[in-house]
Image (cartoon, grey):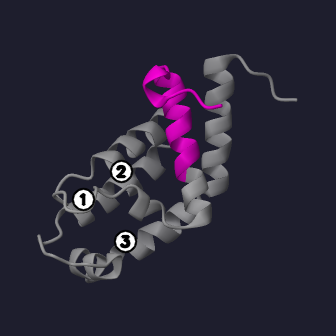
Amino acid sequence: MERPQPELTSAEATVRQVNVLLIDMEMGGWLYNLSPEAGASQDNWFELRETAEAVDAVGAASEAKVLLEIADIVERAPQSSSSTWEDFMAAADPTSRVAVLEKIMLKEIPTLYKKLEANTIRHFGCEKT
């Protein structure tokens, strides 16, 4: 059974956060999963920015910058009562820049896994078998 997140050390939380991002990227819907709660202000994508910090912490600085660029785009969305994700994204990103950045991130999944593994070995003294 998984320990509740508040009990995780900083290093454990970083590993967990990057791992969740990778799984969500592979399964789809990762950006939606990092979006603010429904009805909340869209001008602060805290979870996306926090995830970018975690990605940077495992040594993937360029990938973290891509996530921050996505955050900059979606945080500038006009406040509206858009009822669907597609409506929100159309208003937030009329030039479809996020789709281009998402493709960059998806190409980097293998690199992110390698960096996450190296970070995990370094911080937890694990040995690769």
Q: Which mark is residue 98?
A: 3
Give the main secondary structure of the magenta stretch. Answer: helix
Frontmost of labels 2 and 3 is 2
Q: Residue at x 21, y 78 (%)?
A: 82
Residues at marks 1 and 2, CA–CA distance in whole angstroms? 10 Å
Q: Position of residue 56 (x, y in %)?
A: 45, 39
Q: Residue at x 41, y 44 (%)?
A: 51
Q: Which residue is nearer to you in this view: 85 or 4? A: 4
**Helix, strand or loop for disc 1:** helix
Q: Position of residue 95 (x, y in %)?
A: 29, 83
Name the amino acid type tagged 1: Asp
> Disc 1 or 3, which lies upstream in sequence?
1
Q: Quadrant of residue 120 in the image?
A: top right
Residue range (magenta): 1-21
The N terminus sits in image quarter: top right
Mark 1 nearby-residue class (10 Å; few <14, some 14–19, many ≥20): some
